[in-house]
Amino acid sequence: MEADIVLKNGLILTMDEGFNFHEKADLAIKDSKIIDISPQTKYKGKKTIEARGKLLMPGLINCHTHAAMAMMRGLADDMAFETWWHDFIFPIEKRLLDPDFIRVGAGLAAIEMIKSGTTTFNDMYFFEDVAAETCRQVGIRSYLGETVMSAETPDKKTPDEALKLIEEMKEKWRDDPIVHLTVAPHAPYSCDEAALKKSKQLSDRLDLPLHIHIAETAGEVEAFKATHGGSTPVEYLASTGFLSEKVIAVHCVHLSRHDIELLKKHDVKVAHCQESNMKLAVGSAPIVEIQNEGIVVGLGTDGAASNNNLDMFDEMDSAAKFHKATHADPTVMPAKTVVKMATRDGARLLGRSDLGSLAIGQTADVIIVGLNRPHLVPLYNIYSNLVYSAGGGDVDTAIINGKLIMENRKMLTVDEGEIIDRANHLAKKIEREVKHA
Ligand SMILES: [Zn+2]
């Protein structure tokens, strides 16, 4: 019996409901699916990869980023959120974003993500039609949401134009296995009631996730309350009928007890971006309290301009440690929970029960992590090693939708060196523009 790819003799961390772990097993893939996990598979692979001493696990799911912002990595650091956003990032985006910027930035980000173990990412940015072509070529699974704002954006004059693009893209990529769409109103403070309402309607009509930043800074929440009769952003969204199980609420740093109850009541999912929150010093998201309510929380890097990388291993490490520190309690946010957030819970956040775990019938988004390295030895607890010791550079191989995308750290779909050269070239132009601004 023939499979497309057989991974031999690996340790297999399934991240399934029972957290099953195989000390030594084979995993067989045909078309886009896992067709066997067993000690000695009967399937012969057209391609066989020896994984002795290596770990097979579900590809990581980055629940929130702005991929093309990889081009703004290190451009504006160590400054207050308002300065960072109003004086640097948004003006640069308005002046410099064009299709070529997105091709280079999203290409760079996609390669960085694959090389650090991410196989799916949830994006909110501009020119998402260009990003779709780029991500398809690289071979990463993408959820793309053209940013909806009441004000003019770098590529769209009105919210209607952004929503129209999503509708057109949904039609264009209808049968594509790895390009997926979301509706992405930027935030309650940057979208008026009509923009939020139209976004919600499109999400309902096309059955797409609704991706939105909520309550990132204290100032944002205070200003919102002052102009909305004392309602918090979450209370306002609940009262307008916006909240539902499709909503992916990003950040959720400044929530009241009542806000958390509302998120639970409407089965809203939360994307937690710990490193971005720390770097911009926006506060401490009550993620432990949110999880205690049974709300699904995934992890995201946010854009590289506020992180400054897209490495989900870093994100796991930071999330695990930060909440221990702020709660003065080393038992909160255990490593096992954090790995679940980066895999199975991320898949739930996107409404994908076929991703985020390894089992027969699941979609084959699989990574291979090298374990025979000084910082990963000895191996007593795989979750601890993944969260506290491993880094994205330990990922050797990535398979997405049953296709081998990276093998032994070499990208098989695109020329990595060429994209890095183009990024360095574009960076010179960005630097000149920033200096002359
Ligand atoms: Zn963001």
Image (tube, helix red, strand yellow):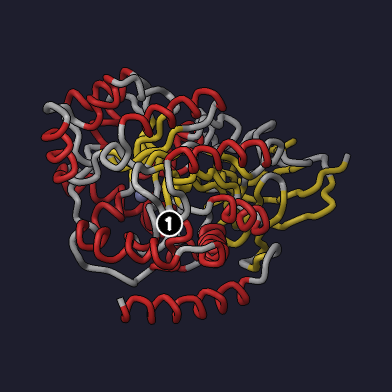
The answer to which image quadrant residue 21 occupies is top right
Taking the spot 71% from the left edge, 55% from the top edge, the residue there is: 404
Residue 8 is left or right of residue 235, and the answer is: right
Q: How many numbered circles are shown?
A: 1
Quadrant containing the N terminus is: top right
Dot 1 surroundings within 10 Å: few (below 14), some, or many (20 or more)? Answer: some
Question: Quick check: 336 above or below 129?
Answer: above
Of residue 27 and residue 222, the one placed in the foreground of this image is 222
Of residue 412 and residue 177, the one placed in the foreground of this image is 177
Taking the spot 59% from the left edge, 40% from the top edge, the residue there is: 180
Residue 105 is left or right of residue 5, and the answer is: left
Residue labelled with disc 1? 154
Q: Amino acid at mark 1?
A: Pro
Quadrant containing the C terminus is: bottom left
Taking the spot 25% from the left edge, 29% from the top edge, the residue there is: 234
Point out residue 375 in the picture as x, y percentages from the top left corner. Answer: 43, 65
Taking the spot 68% from the left edge, 36% from the top edge, the residue there is: 174
The answer to which image quadrant residue 417 occupies is bottom right
Of residue 249 and residue 373, the one placed in the foreground of this image is 249
Question: Quick check: 257 above or below 402?
Answer: above
Task: Label 1, secondary structure: give it.
Answer: loop
Point out residue 429 in the picture as x, y percentages from the top left corner. Answer: 45, 79
Point out residue 68 in the picture as x, y percentages from the top left corner. Answer: 47, 60
